[in-house]
Image: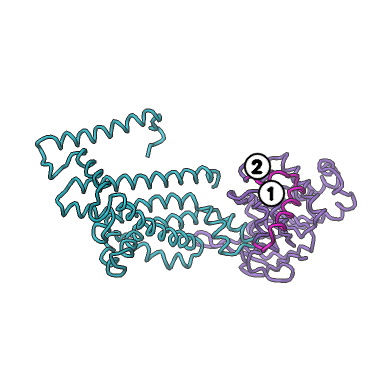
Amino acid sequence: MKNIAFEDVTKVFPRGGGTFTAIERITLDVAEKEFVAIVGPSGCGKTTLMRMAAGLEFPSSGSVSVGGRAVTAPGPDRAVVFQQFALFPWKTVRDNIAFGLKCKGASRAEQDDAVRKYLELMGMQGTEDSFPHQLSGGMQQRVAIARSYAIDPDVLLMDEPFGALDAQTRTVMQEELIRLSRFNPRTVLFITHSVDEAVYLADRVVVLARNPGRIREILDVAATRRAEEWDARAIEEVMDLPSFTGMRTHLWKLLREQIAGTE
Amino acid sequence: MAAVNRTARPGELLLLTALGAALFFGGWQALAASDLVSKQVLPSPLAVLEAGWTMTQKPFAGNLLQAHILASLQRFAMGFGLAALIGVPLGLVMGRYRVIDDAVSPIFEGLRFIAPLAWVPFAALWFGTGIGGPVMVIFAGAFPPCVINAYRGAQLVETRLVEAAQTLGARNVRIIAEVLLPGALPSIVAGLRVSAGLAWQSLIGAELIVVSAGIGYVMVQGQSNLSPAIVMAGMLAVGAVGLAIDVLLRLAERTVRKRWGHVA
């Protein structure tokens, strides 16, 4: 089991003839089995942050480590759920979910067990032989989440996983993710631009500022979540609680300042 | 070939095809029957068909026409198969590794402009006039489209699919086999079709110069026998077999496009 540690991380990209600082001196520790959501205006570097934890990008200075080891490449200990699902269109649902296990050298029987387990958990029994394009967006993202859970990763990195879904599907998926993370807690870094989603899902919400991307504030939700037993309640009920609306309003103000301040 | 706004209905298409063929063969027959040209210069279509038919009954240049066609097809299959077997993986690897791309591309880009037939002297010198030489000439013709289409296809595979595979623990060989290959398949199949056409053309060229059986050889022998009907019968056979190969591969291309249509 692992934590994610960003230590004084700066990321500079070449842009045009010059450079662009996407992330400047961010230090953040996501504890083992903690669910941290990152919100911020577009261009604040939240996706870059996630990609560095995944090993798809590397810091220009500072260090990113997972479980105490510096991240040097992508690996199955850190599963990624992409915004556009990134399912293999030529593979069936079964083969998509089993792909990571196959890479590990798991037997056919082990693969089938995992596929059955996660399809059941996602309420998608009987879709094994479908191809991704035959499923709705919500179903496709369920398959992508199942594919990530199937490799039993210590860390889950989610890059606006519900961003491409319609509002209703999104709400259902948020509830399911809460259910899933209670059943199967992981260290989660969750990127979103939805304040509601962040407060509803996360133990802590990190607000980033942009130009360059840096931490503006960190809001602790976990204590309230536990005290008011959010996870046992329906999502619409939670979102009506004074504690929830208070945090939402606070975060909105922070974001609005930034959007107004830089444009 | 039919542009979007000029697709003919199936019946219409058949009629027009028949009309075109009738005009072509009718004109040819009329020209041959007239006194304008000698039979030694332009044999009539009927004389060509007859020459072709005779060759399927009585051996010419050592073999029946069908045996010649078979000999050509075997060489074609070997050269084309070799080109696909080496070219497609090479293209995919070039699409995956920048280093290999940078190392191979310049040489490849230069070499591919050399006409396959220009390789004939070396092919004969290095691999002989038996099976090796002609196969090398076909290979020279068939190789570039295999590489180029696999390469471009691999580059067009969405980055996030490769990244998804990486984060799920896939290594390079698996990424190439299970992500790049299927992702590039429509492009690869289109390349194979171009490649087969070039292979078949190069083959006949090679057979004009080397070997002792095959359609190209039939044509050379017809020429030295001063029999234009035999030469033209050979040409007809080349056209017919080439068309058959193309139709088969077009079918394969359509099947792949249909199954892979939702990709990308």
Q: Colour of chain B?
A: cyan
Residue matched to label 1: A143
Write down the region rendered in magenta.
Answer: A103-130
Q: State how far apart marks 1 and 2 are (Cα).
A: 10 Å
Q: Residue at x 47, y 61 (%)?
A: B89
Taking the image as shown, residue B95 lies to the left or right of residue B71, namely: right
- Under circle 2, the secondary element is loop
Crowd around label 2: few <14 · some 14–19 · many ≥20 (10 Å): some
Q: Is residue B2 magenta?
A: no
Q: In front here: B91 or B192?
A: B192
Residue matched to label 2: A135
Name the disc covering residue A31, or none: none
Q: Colour of chain A?
A: purple
Q: Position of residue A124 (x, y in %)?
A: 73, 44
Chain at numbered mark 2 = A
Q: Position of residue B131 (x, y in %)?
A: 33, 63
Marks 1 and 2, the one that precedes in the sequence:
2
> Can you name the residue that lies furthest to the front here?
B58
Q: In front here: B118 or B80?
A: B80
